[in-house]
Amino acid sequence: MKLVVLLFSLLLSISAQAAIDAYKFDDPKKEKIYHELTDELRCLVCQNQNIAGSNAELAVDMRRKTYEMVSAGQSKQQVADYMADRYGDFVLYKPPFKASTAVLWIGPFIILAVSIWLMLRVIRNRREEHETASVSGEQLAEAARLLNKEDKS
Amino acid sequence: MNKAAIPLAIFIGLVVLFAFMLGQMNDGEYNPRDIPTEFIGKPAPSFDLPSLFDGQANVTSAAQAGKPWLLNVWGTWCAECWKEHDYLLTLHRRNIPIIGLNWRDEAAEAKKFLAQKGNPFKAVGFDPNSNAVIDWGVYGAPETFLIDANGMIRVKHKGALNEQVWQEKFASFFAG
């Protein structure tokens, strides 16, 4: 039981992020936008971290820039566009769907489809092998002979 | 074909692919840390920064318009910038206009650095809070931009400048 509780508690440890700067917002909506943005913007010098979770100086600067833009009333899209204009789609953890990012978005589904197709093929082949090659006519005759022999004795 | 050969072939294929990619990365291609700039061929963002030197007018991008110029992002904390500095002085002697963007630095340290090693810059903007730096999509130092006479960014180079890089990427813009 204890083990089950422990295992489940692992599921609850969603990204524990340090709120490093104490920015004040005059509007809870802006604060929400700020948190969404810092979650979805990639830190450029410490890759595979978002700027909310990074203490690198550039991430601190980008958070400040995000804060300034959001408190000035800019929308989430405007800030994301500003960053992407400068640092490319790479800076976005949710890149927009376009030709250069199509593989990123569609790729997993293609891999899934191919895997299912391969799996079905393997299963079908196995089944055919079982049906055709398991017992030959000769073996059946031999089995019948042995059985009959036993009956007689 | 022998069935066991298929996984082996896939494995060898992957090894070859990974070795190739790793080799390319070591050669500077496919560098995961290399973020392509979105700026080439686009108008340079404007900036208006206080000068590193007290009492001088603000350093602005507008003041440079009309002929090609370089924007060099540097800081005394950046080791590559120290290496690059001698080459910037060489460019300065060739009358290449370089505007310095002193990034996230102590003003006193930066001034001492230039006083000791020589100052290759026409003017130095002081940007301790990365305002212009983020505006220009800079993420490391040194970075050098070439802005043409029409205010378009034509080249961005990340890392130290040297003669080879200069000849490859920059020289043609100053040939005329």
Image (cartoon, coloured by chain):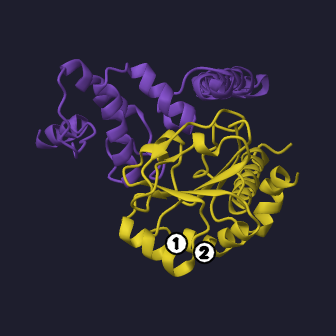
Chain colours: A purple, B yellow
Q: Position of residue B134 (x, y in %)?
A: 47, 43
Residue type at numbered disc 2: Lys
Identify the disc placed on residue A74: none
In the image, residue A66 above or below residue B144: above
Secondary structure at numbered mark 1: helix
Is residue B30 left or right of A14 when viewed as pictured? right
Q: Are marks 2 and 1 on the same chain?
A: yes
Q: Chain of mark 2?
A: B
Q: Position of residue A139 (x, y in %)?
A: 73, 28
The residue at which mark 2 appears reads as B83
Is residue B37 left or right of A36 when viewed as pictured? right
Q: Residue at x 34, y 40 (%)?
A: A63
Q: Residue at x 60, y 60 (%)?
A: B122
Q: Mark 2 touching mark 1, by CB under 8 A?
A: yes
Residue type at numbered disc 1: Ala
The residue at which mark 1 appears reads as B79
For disc 1, the neighbor class at 10 Å (few under 14, some 14 to 19, many from 20) is: few
